[in-house]
Amino acid sequence: MSQQHSAAPAPTPTSASAVATVAKRRDWWRDAVIYQVYPRSFADSNGDGMGDLEGVRSRLPYLRDLGVDAVWLSPFYASPQADAGYDVADYRAVDPMFGNLLDADALIRDARELGLRIIVDLVPNHSSDQHEWFKRALADGPGSPLRERYHFRPGKGDDGELPPNDWESIFGGPAWTRVTEPDGTPGEWYLHLFAPEQPDFNWEHPAVGDEFRSILRFWLDMGVDGFRIDVAHGLVKEHGLPDLGSHEQLKLLGNDVMPFFDQDGVHDIYRQWRLILDEYSGERIFVAEAWTPTVERTANYVRPDELHQAFNFQYLGTAWDAEELRTVVDRTLEAMRPVNAPATWVLSNHDVTRHATRFANPAGLGTQIRTAGDRDLGLRRARAATLLMLALPGSAYVYQGEELGLPDVVDLPDEVRQDPAYFRGAGQDGFRDGCRVPIPWTREGSSYGFGDGGSWLPQPASWAELSVEAQDGVEGSTLELYRAALRLRRSQPDLGAGDAVEWLKAPEGVLAFRRGEFVCVANTSGESARIPAYGRVLLASGEIAEVDGEAKLPADTTVWFTTA
C-alpha cells in the first residue's frame, strides 16, 4: 500500500472570504454548471506527456473565468492504470503520475479561494487487482476471509473449467477470470463486470461498507465538496448470481434491470452514505453515474435521503430532433419532480464520442462513433445543443474541451490506443480514446500548450486553431459563446434551478419554451424557420435576422430572448 496516507496535511482554517465565495448560494447544486476534468488530458505541469494535479491547479483561473461552479475530477488515485485510473489500488493515495496528496490538498484549497468546488470520482463497484485486499485474497487461497470481500466462486464443469455463470463483461468476453492457486493448480473464478484487472467488490460483506465509509470521511476531511459515484448502479448483485440466459448482453443494457445492475439493494448503501455527508457543512453532494432502463428508475437514486444528482444518460443519447428532445425533457422533469431532485443535462463525457462529432453524423449510430462526419454541421449543432441544454431547468455538465468545439479524434493509430475495451472482443466499441486526447491551450508547441513534452495521445494539427489562445476574445468563437452563456445563466433570474418549462407553439422541427421572462428557441430542422421575435436577443449560437416582429432562425441554431 502507498505511504502517502501519512503525508496528508492537517486541516487548517480556510479564509472567511473564500468560504463566503464558495458558500454564497444555498442549494448551489440545483442549478450548478459542473466541469469535468479528465486529469491525464487537461494540463501537464512536468513535461512527461501526462496531465497531473499541478497542471489542473494552474488552470483553475481559466475555469473560474469560464463561469462554471464546480470541477469534477476523474480518478487520480494510485492505480496500475489498466482502465485509466478506474482500477484503484489505493483510495487514499494519489498516483505518482498525477502528483501526491499535497498536490491534491493545494488544488482543493486554490479552488476554494477562486470560488470553485471540487468533486472527486469514487469507484466503489470494483478495485484494481493490485489492491492489497485482492492480492492477499489470491495469496491466501480458497477459503480465505479476504476472498469473501470479492465474488470468488468455483467453476462449473467436471474440473471447474467453466465460469460460474453466463455473465459477460461490459468490456467484452466473460465476466469471470480463473485464478491459479498458490499451489499452482487452476482454481476459483472471480467476477469482474469490466476488465479482468477490475475485480468486483462483494457489497454483502460488511468490511466493504466499512472501508468505503472511511474513504468518504478521508476525502471529506481533505475538503472535497462531493463525489461522483462510478457505476453507482452496479454495487449489488442479485442473490445467487443467476444466469442471465442470453448472449450479447451489452445490447440489453439500458433496456432491462439486470441481475448485476440497478438492483434495489444499492439504495440502502446510499442512505448510509448520505448520513455521513450530512455531517459535514458546506452542502457537499453525491452525483450518481447510474445507467438505468428508464429515467423513472434513475429518480430512485435521488430521493431525499439518498444522492443529490444522477446523470441523465437518456438525454445524452437523444438525437438532435425537436420531438425527441421535447419528449425526454418532459419525461425527465416529470420523473424528478416527485423526489424534489434537480434534472441534470449532459452532452459529452470521457466515455462517449464528443457531441460535436455525434451530431456531425446521421442519427441512430449510438454514443460511440468512428467517423468524423460533417465537421461544420456537427459544430453548428453542438453550439445550438449547448445553448438548449444550459437553458433547461436544473444542473448541467460540461466535459473539458467541449467549450472549444473539439471533435473526437477518430483516426488515432491502433498502436497508441489505451482503452481496455479496444483489446477485447464483443464489448464496448473500445474507441473512447478519441474523446480523451489532451486539449489544446496554445497555437504552437509540442502539444499546443498541454505541456512541454508532447502528449500521451497525439493531437491533430487542426487543433492549433481550436486552442484556447486561438479563440480567446474572438467574437463568435465557441469559447466566447460558452463564456457568454454561463454569464447570462448566472445573471438571468429565470435561468438555472426549477422543475418546469412552458412550451410554446413553434414550426415543425423547432423547440420553443418560456421560463418567466426568458424564452429559448432551438431549430433542429435542416432549414431556416421564421419565429416570433419574443423580445430582446440575449445570445444566439449563430447569426439571426429580425424583420417586422419576426426572427429568421437558421437551421441548427438556438437563440435566447428576454421579454423584460
Image (cartoon, rainbow, N blue to C red):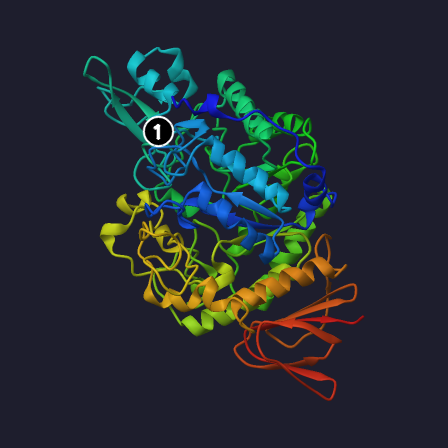
Q: Residue furthest bottom?
A: 548
Q: Nearer the viewer, residue 299 or 381?
A: 381
Residue at image position (55%, 77%) is 555
Q: Quadrant of residue 161?
A: top left
Q: 141 and 464: which one is in front?
A: 464
Which quadrant does the C terminus fall into? Answer: bottom right
Q: Position of residue 149 (x, y in %)?
A: 43, 19
* Vertical side of 307 occupied by 65: above or below: below
Residue 276: image location, x then y, percent: 64, 25
Residue at (51% x, 26% y) in the render? 8
For the N terminus, the image quarter is: top left
Q: Is residue 519 above or below residue 345?
A: below
Q: Image height check: is 374 above or below 143?
A: below
Q: Considering only vertical position in the picture, is 296 above or below 445?
A: above
Q: Which residue in the structure is indicated by mark 1? A: 165
Residue 500 coordinates in the image, percent (x, y): 73, 56
121 to the left or right of 168: right
Residue 381's x, y, as percent?
51, 69
**Residue 233 seen anywhere in this rendered image of the structure:** no
Q: Is residue 488 visible?
A: yes
- Callout 1 crowding tier (Cα within 10 Å): few <14, some 14–19, many ≥20: some
